[in-house]
Amino acid sequence: MQDVSKTAFDVLVVGSGASGGWACKRLSEAGLKVALLEAGRQQSDANFSEHKPAFQLKYRDQAASIIKKTRPVQKDCYACMEYNYDWYCNDLDEPYTTTEKMPFSWQGRMRITGGRTNVWGRQSYRLSDLDFKAASHDGYGEDWPLSYKDVAPYYDMVEEYVGITGMPEGVYELPDSKFHPPMALTCAEVMVRDRLRQKMGRTMTLGRSANITKAINGRAACHYCGPCERGCVTHSYFNSAFTTVADALKTGNCTLISDAMVYKVLMDSDRNRATGLLYIDRNTRQPKEVHGRAVVLCAQALESVRILFNSAGRQYPKGLANSSGVLGHYLMDHITGGGANGELEGLVGKASINEPTRPDGIYVIRFRNTHNGPRYTRFLRGYGYQGGGGFGFNFRAPGFGEAYKKALTESRAYFGLGGFGECLPRLDN
Ligand SMILES: Cc1cc2nc3c(=O)[nH]c(=O)nc-3n(C[C@H](O)[C@H](O)[C@H](O)COP(=O)(O)OP(=O)(O)OC[C@H]3O[C@@H](n4cnc5c(N)ncnc54)[C@H](O)[C@@H]3O)c2cc1C
Ligand code: SF4
């Protein structure tokens, strides 16, 4: 077995999620010797349970209180369930504090190869110059030093590899991606799409989702079983565990070091260069070192910042890479809220049990403060809606007993929307 403490790697990558997976793939395919340090254990197809009925689970996926015993914060996340909760960190082992007035539910702290790409919602949208150059548009914050033109070729490359289902719309605010054939909209969605366009001039499109609809790179097209957050044996959604990380390992140039909780970056203070990483082996609880010429931190936004603070020393008293003093500030998370649900009249159809489930919804493209549209005075920037519609059982039928059971089977066409907005960058975030 390779003794990693004695190996001189070219690059050390911390975290095997969306960003770390790409770093490892590109660097190891280019011939560099890479070590990938991941705090979690190894992922495997044997852990995937997307086809397992709930009755085969001990608690039928109905006992949130059992999960909350060890994951009281992680259980806030809709995708943390009896099927997969041991992919998430144990909140009791990894506690954090916030000030009393600023609680923060830090969800999606994964401890398994692939990080959050195991459970993510797969919605994959390009930014436009309305995002990259937002400050020029509305005067708040700073423009990115990059423009859409600079980033577009990289979007092309990533999307061709990842595979995004979607519909081209030609809308400035949401540039089209390189799409796989679109999953079909339901009748309810077509109806709402048409009305939104006719009556309000807004564009509703299929959610742009990292679920493939044609086979690529040994991955099969999605077969619409539905619960991707429980894994996928056909590898039909994008999870770095079975895409980028697997490719990196295949080169023979990448060594995955699992259960390695990175604590700090080791520095050569004379040369002002990183030389390695100090990590804790989670199985033995022993501190260990690994050495390389460069370090790439991809341990998730907050964890990477923590590692930089932990790396403070005499030469860097405020933390590593913090000469600006902004480390740990300006956090931007997305916010959700608002929206509506309703029934649609005039559509006749039938709800059914166990029908194919499209693992994707719809998206209403930003319509507020658009490139050439009017400026809204009470709200900066923009937001979109995710949602979807189709036929469902009439669970809201009145009554009980036999009459209720009968009324329940009368299908209803429903439609729902929920808002997704961005957070402004502020020092006290
Ligand atoms: C339920 C859910 C739904 C989401 N839906 C969407 C969506 O629809 N569209 C979208 O764009 N984004 C979505 N996201 C967000 C998206 O998953 C993340 O933005 C993305 O995965 C971030 O990639 P990352 O590489 O920064 O971090 P992650 O993917 O989180 O990977 C970080 C990895 O680093 C490891 N790590 C952490 N600390 C250490 C340490 N000290 N030492 C070693 N390893 C460490 C972790 O174990 C983890 O494996 C969703 C997230 C969640 C939780
Ligand atoms: S819905 Fe598609 S991508 Fe999701 S788990 Fe099923 S086959 Fe895989």
Image: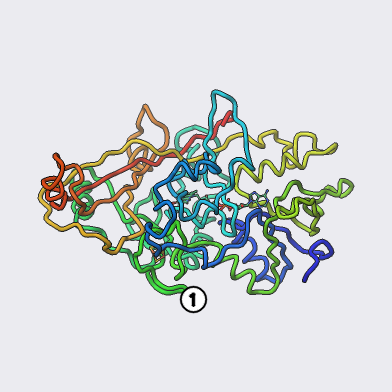
Along the line of sight, the residue nearer the viewer: 104 or 74? 74
Residue drawn at x 47%, y 61% is: 231
Most extreme residue toward the bottom is 218
Q: Quadrant of the N terminus?
A: bottom right
Residue drawn at x 60%, y 48% is: 300
What amino acid type is highlighted by mark number 1?
A: Gly
- Left or right? Give the position of 391 relative to 323: left
Most extreme residue toward the right is 270
The x and y percentages for residue 86 are: 54, 53
Please say if 190 is above or below 220.
above
Residue drawn at x 62%, y 66% is: 25
Instruction: Name which quarter of the figure residue 429 lies in.
Output: top right
- Identify the image's colour scheme: rainbow, by chain, secondary structure or one colour: rainbow
Whether ligand 2 has any atom under 8 Å from the Cβ at mark 1 is answered as: no
Could one spot residue 124 in this view of the protein? Answer: no
Along the line of sight, the residue nearer the viewer: 87 or 167? 87
Local SS, label 1:
loop
